[in-house]
Image: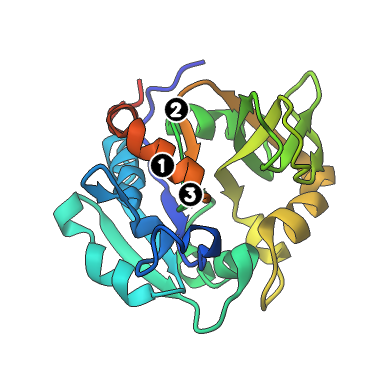
Amino acid sequence: MAVNKQIDTMAVLLVGGMGTRLRSVVPDAPKPLASVGNKAFLELLVRQLRDQDIRQIVMCTGYRAEQIEGYFRDGRHYGVSIRYSRELEPQGTGGAIKLTETFLQAEAQFIVMNGDSFMQVNFAELLEFHDDRRAILSMAVRRVLDAGRYGTVELDANHRVISFGEKTGLNQAGIVNAGVYVFSREVLQMIPQGPCSLEKDILPKLLDRGVYALEQRGEFIDIGTPEDYARAQQIHDRLNEAASVKSM
């Protein structure tokens, strides 16, 4: 698959959650600003996008929005341009994306990423995968040994998503949603105004329209629990290196 085209798309980062499970170890900051090594976790995502020539970013802020907005400002210091879509009341992941609609009027497609997880991914490859399948939505997925705390994804032989599984808490292998997506603009029209969940309310309704998944094999971590946050500290050198890998 050729992946040498110039990337010209925007990225939407979901960074507004309250992060209640992490509050015991990160009590005074929103979860995406939790320190990993000596930098905020969210810097990994910003640098990953920048180093793959994705420099237009919209951050969906909410809980302690002023901290994130004050940390990154307009993004110039990080070599990107950042704008903010601040929710005044919790809107859920789907509602937060809906609020960005005015920023995305000229975009035929755009990237969406969870701000509390990192997935090593080649964005040019994922975008081409999306185009080739004429998907309404494409997602990065990862096979893990312990899928119990994630939502799982079932695929057919053509990489089409046929179902989503709930978190089971069981220690068993599976393919999980890595929190990195390519949306066709059409998806925005299918998200209602007001609070809703992307994972529970929107994604299942899109399956008949063509949702596809590209499996990744690089670094992956979600810092949503104290245990995984501690693991991120242990592997922060690997995460930093993975964030700086440029697309081919």
Q: As shown in the figure, which amino acid type bears the numbered disc 1?
A: Ala
Report the front residue among 61 and 144: 144
The residue to which callout 3 is attached is 226
Q: Position of residue 188 (x, y in %)?
A: 63, 62
Q: Nearer the viewer, residue 5 or 80?
A: 80
Tell me which residue sits at (46%, 56%) in the image.
12
- Residue depicted at x 67% and y 58%: 198
| Neighbours of disc 1 within 10 Å: few (<14), some (14-19), many (20+) | some
| Disc 1 from disc 3: Cα separation | 6 Å
Q: Do the residues under discs 1 and 3 have CB atoms within 8 angstroms?
A: yes
Q: Which residue is tagged 1?
A: 230
Are discs 3 and 2 less than 8 Å apart at CB? no
Which callout, 3 or 2, points to the residue nearer the camera? 3
- For the point 51% across and 68% down, the residue is 18
Q: Which quadrant of the structure image shows residue 143?
A: top right
- Residue 27 locus on image (x, y percent): 39, 67
SS at circle 2: loop
Q: Quick check: 210 above or below 190?
A: above
Res 50 → quadrant? top left
Residue 236 shows up from this direction: yes
Task: Determine the CA span between mark 3 and mark 2.
Answer: 19 Å
Dot 2 amino acid type: Glu
Q: Is residue 73 left or right of residue 136?
A: left
